[in-house]
Image (cartoon, grey):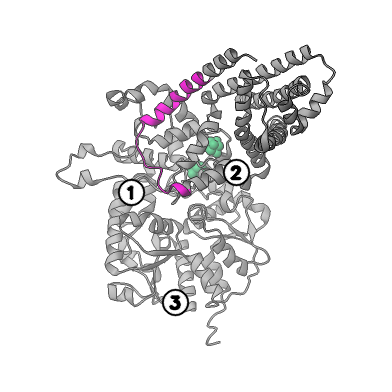
């Protein structure tokens, strides 16, 4: 080989790689700081499980997952082989010997066969199976082609080198013994002349090294940059709780000594994004998994996390000079909402979290969208017209319906539910039942509340409600970007609950559950919060209530804010398993892959002007199961799906019912007295 040739080739390739990589990484480094390195061991565990061993991908789709894992692990372990080839560039007779060298030589042959099989499957998938989410992609095919060339030329190099040198160089003869494929191939060309073998080995060597270097230079140019950045991106992931809304520091508004112009709300331009937002955009593999059950994408809205990352990536590169210049140049960057991320894209998101849960490298969309919504609402005053009424309604009446706040407890009239009015009242009961707006004001929701009260009574639990004094969590306005209003509502709620000495809360509303459990600790609210399905499950297990199965076929819809955002998939299933006729039915998209009903992210209050309706699509997904009842564990899902059934004129044959309603109607009453 040629020491000079290999030196020049490697220097040129690494210089190009470093220069091209720095074009992107410098942008990442120039954006807003954010601490993403707390709990380093937990982060490392994710890097191992979802990075090196790609468990998240295998769990969701095992065939492509295994294929990708084989290629990735092969890629990593073959880096050692490339080092060996570099040394051979300086010393043609260099060979790996010793126990470690022998083991690696065997491993390398096996890995290369595995990678070739995996690449074959990848070609088959892209060219023949053509899964809907994989758009035609020349870069993907080019990379598969380059990997194939690298594997084949490596076997060819071994074959020609072994045939040429194993008789005369003992170390190479030793290596040949441990390389079954290379050795077998060498036996096929054993009768070639030494000169021809030397030329063939040189061609295979340079073909491989040039392909490896071309691959290296290609990496930072396109989506395959993720080979470099995926592991760091996994390390710097957000972690729990999922769906956290970036907090806005409103103190400049409240503190007379501060300058209100210092108030920084959300994100207007790329300069306001955090460095991790840019790293995510540059790391997106364009695999399209985030679209599979995105309710917006599936119903024709102009939104997918892949699309957002793609637009953002191109924008960051186009605005690179201004981002790196900082100061006035950054201040003059164009707004993101508009040309980069359309207004319809921003407001189409139901914040269901499917995309983030599906993304194999845990990229994040929601923090970006929350920051953009915050800026649009609080700084620009621009947002969908329907939200104006919602914000006003919350401000005046503390509920999105805008119904009089003093009627909040009317649903419980005549039920004799204890009203909590003081810390002494609170100390006298075990649970605060946080009812929430939907169950207080919507007729359908009120039925859920009454059914739950029946269950609590039957179980003999002591509980109370706040009635007209119940503050709202403001979860919906927070997701809509009105952080100012949310923080006012949160302050009221925390003062009220802490003043009463609240310790344990049960709620039927997964949005309130998520907010009280995951968001209120940041505002001073530290309570035990459980969802009603969890409490009912406990009551059934402890035999404090008993149910008899109904005669209805029950299909369960997973609420996103209970399941995906809080990991609770089992409780509703355990409860309904005792109530449904036969086995509980499942949507094709269920548990982690469940599709949203369309209500989250304040979408409940916005019209759907584009595409088809999400709630109708969700109903259509469940019809092949021929349910009598679609069970939900969220009053908003119940409303949305009920509306979907009406749209399809199916409300006479299929009903939506909350888990609490189904349990209450299946409950064996007054067991003690009976
Ligand atoms: S959070 Fe849900 S609606 Fe929003 S982009 Fe992701 S999958 Fe789509
Ligand atoms: S955001 Fe994640 S799931 Fe979506 S295309 Fe990019 S890498 Fe794939």
Task: Give the CA separation, mark 1 to mark 3.
Answer: 36 Å
Question: Foreground residue, 19 or 191?
Answer: 191
| Residue 613 at least partly seen | no
Kindly report which numbered mark, 3 or 2, lies closer to the viewer in this rendering: 2
Question: Foreground residue, 619 or 240?
Answer: 240
Name the residue tied to disc 2.
Answer: 53
In the image, residue 555 lies in the stretch drawn in magenta: no
In the image, residue 25 lies in the stretch drawn in magenta: yes
Q: Quadrant of residue 384?
A: top left
Kindly report which numbered mark, 1 or 3, lies closer to the viewer in this rendering: 3
In the depicted structure, whether residue 628 falls above or below residue 16: below
In the depicted structure, whether residue 406 falls above or below residue 194: below
Label 1: how many Cα within 10 Å (few below 14, some 14–19, many 20+): many
Residue occupying image coordinates x 69% and y 23% = 149
Q: Which mark is residue 461?
A: 3
Indicate the position of residue 537 as horizontal and vertical percent values. 53, 69
Label 3 element class: loop
| Residue 542 at least partly seen | yes
Task: Give the CA separation, mark 3 to mark 2.
Answer: 47 Å
Label 3: how many Cα within 10 Å (few below 14, some 14–19, many 20+): some
Name the residue tied to disc 1.
Answer: 391
Question: Foreground residue, 330 or 438?
Answer: 330
Q: Quadrant of the C terminus?
A: bottom right
Report ligand 2 position as a quadrant: top right
Q: Earlier in the sequence, mark 1 or mark 3?
A: 1
């Amino acid at each position: 080989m040629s020491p000079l040739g290999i030196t020049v080739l490697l220097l040129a390739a690494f210089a190009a790689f470093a220069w091209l990589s720095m074009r992107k990484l410098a942008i990442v480094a120039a954006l807003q700081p954010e601490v993403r390195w707390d709990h380093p061991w937990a982060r490392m565990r994710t890097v191992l499980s979802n990075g090196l061993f790609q468990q998240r991908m295998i769990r969701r789709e095992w065939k492509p997952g295994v294929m990708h894992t084989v290629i990735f692990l092969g890629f990593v372990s073959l880096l050692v082989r490339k080092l060996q080839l570099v040394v051979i560039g300086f010393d043609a007779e260099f060979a790996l010997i010793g126990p470690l060298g022998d083991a690696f030589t065997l491993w390398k042959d096996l890995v290369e066969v595995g990678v070739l099989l995996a690449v074959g499957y990848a070609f088959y998938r892209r060219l023949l199976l053509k899964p809907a989410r994989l758009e035609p992609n020349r870069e993907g095919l080019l990379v598969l082609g380059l990997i194939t060339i690298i594997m084949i030329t490596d076997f060819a190099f071994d074959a020609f080198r072994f045939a040429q040198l194993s008789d005369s160089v003992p170390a190479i003869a030793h290596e040949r013994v441990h390389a079954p494929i290379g050795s077998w191939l060498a036996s096929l060309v054993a009768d070639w002349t030494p000169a021809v073998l030397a030329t063939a080995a040189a061609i295979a060597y340079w073909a491989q090294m040039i392909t490896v270097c071309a691959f290296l230079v290609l990496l930072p140019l396109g989506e395959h940059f993720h080979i470099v950045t995926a592991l760091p991106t996994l390390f710097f992931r957000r972690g729990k709780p999922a769906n956290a809304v970036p907090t806005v520091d409103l103190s400049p508004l409240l503190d007379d000594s501060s300058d209100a112009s210092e108030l920084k709300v959300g994100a207007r331009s790329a300069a306001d994004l955090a460095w991790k937002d840019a790293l995510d955009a540059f790391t997106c593999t364009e695999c399209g998994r985030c679209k599979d059950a995105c309710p917006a994408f599936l119903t024709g809205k102009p939104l997918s996390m892949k699309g957002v990352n793609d637009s953002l990536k191109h924008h960051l590169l186009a605005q690179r000079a201004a981002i790196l210049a900082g100061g006035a140049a950054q201040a003059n960057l164009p707004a993101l909402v508009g040309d980069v991320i359309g207004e319809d894209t921003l407001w189409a998101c139901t914040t269901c979290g499917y995309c983030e849960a599906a993304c194999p490298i845990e990229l994040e969309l929601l923090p970006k969208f929350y920051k953009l919504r915050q800026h649009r609402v609080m700084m620009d005053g621009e947002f969908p017209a329907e939200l104006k009424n919602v914000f006003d309604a919350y401000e005046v009446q503390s509920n999105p319906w805008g119904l009089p706040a003093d009627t909040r407890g009317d649903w419980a009239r005549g039920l004799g539910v204890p009203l909590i009015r003081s810390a002494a009242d609170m100390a006298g009961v075990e649970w605060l039942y946080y009812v929430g707006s939907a169950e207080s004001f919507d007729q359908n929701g009120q039925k859920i509340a009454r059914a739950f009260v029946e269950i609590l009574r039957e179980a003999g639990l002591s509980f109370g409600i706040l009635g007209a004094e119940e503050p709202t969590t403001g979860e919906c306005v927070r997701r809509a970007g009105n952080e100012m209003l949310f923080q006012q509502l949160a302050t009221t709620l925390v003062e009220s609950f802490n003043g009463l000495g609240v310790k344990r809360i049960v709620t039927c509303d997964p949005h309130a559950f998520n907010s009280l459990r995951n968001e209120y600790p940041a505002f001073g609210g530290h309570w035990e919060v459980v969802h009603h399905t969890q409490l009912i499950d406990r009551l059934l297990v402890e035999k404090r209530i008993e149910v008899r199965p109904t005669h209805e076929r029950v299909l369960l819809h997973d609420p996103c804010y209970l399941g995906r955002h809080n990991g609770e998939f089992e409780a509703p299933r355990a409860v309904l398993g005792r109530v449904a006729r036969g086995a509980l039915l499942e949507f094709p998209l269920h548990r982690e892959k469940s599709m949203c009903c369309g209500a989250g992210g304040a979408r409940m209050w916005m019209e759907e002007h584009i595409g088809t309706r999400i709630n109708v699509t969700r109903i259509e997904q469940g019809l092949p199961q021929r349910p009598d009842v679609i069970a939900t564990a969220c009053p908003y899902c119940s409303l949305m799906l009920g509306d979907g059934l009406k749209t399809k004129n199916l409300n006479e044959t299929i009903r939506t019912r909350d888990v609490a309603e189904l349990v209450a109607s299946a409950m064996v009453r007054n067991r003690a007295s009976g």
